[in-house]
Every structure is written in C-alpha cells, then in structure tokens.
Image: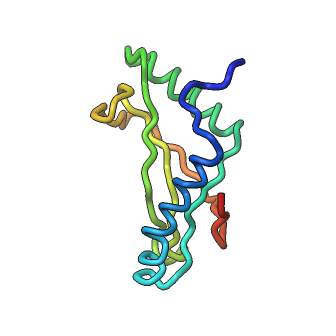
Amino acid sequence: MAKPSKCISVAEARALQSNWTATRAADIQKVQGINDTRDFTFSVNDLQEFLDYVQQESSKQGIANPGIRIYFGAYGEASGGKATVFLAATDGTDGDSGNNYDIDPLNTITGGIPPNIY
C-alpha cells in the first residue's frame, strides 16, 4: 500500500504541535489550573472497528461517502475535568457535512498525563 497523499512530514507535525502548545497550553493551564491532556491514543483495531461500523451503518442509510469529525470534549469534575476527543460520523466529507446522529461516536479515555510531546 502506498503512503496516503494527505500525510504530512514529521517536521510539519512537530511544528503544528509546537504552535498549539505555544499558543494554547499555557492559557488552558492558567484557567483550568491543571496541565491538561492534549494527546490521545486510539488503537488501530479500535479505529478500524469504528470505521467499519460507520461504513456499514452509513451504507444502510444510503450514505455512500461518510466522513469522520473529531470533536474536543471535557470530562466533568468527578473525572478530573480533563480534555478528551471523540470521533463522530458525518453524512459526507466536507466541512459542512451534517453529523450522523444515528451512529454512536467513539471516545477514548487514553490520554497522555503529562502530555506527550510530538
């Protein structure tokens, strides 16, 4: 299999992470009072299972080319108030595609504390 055309270089990824940290991490720590999670790990198997589920359920609904949207979230105070992300199915692949609320989102509770630097 060839490398996907939309991959970026490690250097570009490091620059993106560095920019995010430099422009947001200190403010979040100041407001929240915690060094919050900013990296999240999904297993390849969990991702593949979710993608297969989205494809299957979307096909049943007549959606030929579904997308996946990644949302930031935060747990409540009982769970430490840490950040998380969840993946939600969409009914298309452009930025204006609607969320497909008939397919349950995927969430992970595996985040780096302290945050992992890319």
Q: Nearer the viewer, residue 38 or 65?
A: 38
In the displayed structure, 24 sits above or below 60; it is below
User: For the C terminus, which image quadrant?
Assistant: bottom right
Residue at 46 percent across and 40 percent down: it is 104
- The quarter of the picture where residue 23 lies is bottom left
Relative image position of residue 62 (x, y in whole percent): 38, 14
Is 76 positioned to the left or the right of 95 in the image? Answer: right
Locate the N terminus by quadrant.
Answer: top right
Above or below for 31 versus 2: below
Residue 31: x and y in percent read: 40, 82
User: In front: 61, or 35?
Assistant: 35
Q: Residue at x 60, y 54 (%)?
A: 14
- Residue 43 image offset from top left, x and y in percent: 70, 44
Residue at image position (66%, 39%) is 46
Numbered label tally? 0
User: From what the image shows, is residue 63 above or below residue 88?
Assistant: above
Residue lying at 63% horizontally and 61% vertically, measured from the top left = 111
Look at the image and name its color scheme: rainbow
Q: Position of residue 64 (x, y in %)?
A: 42, 15
Name the one closer to the observer, 27 or 12.
12
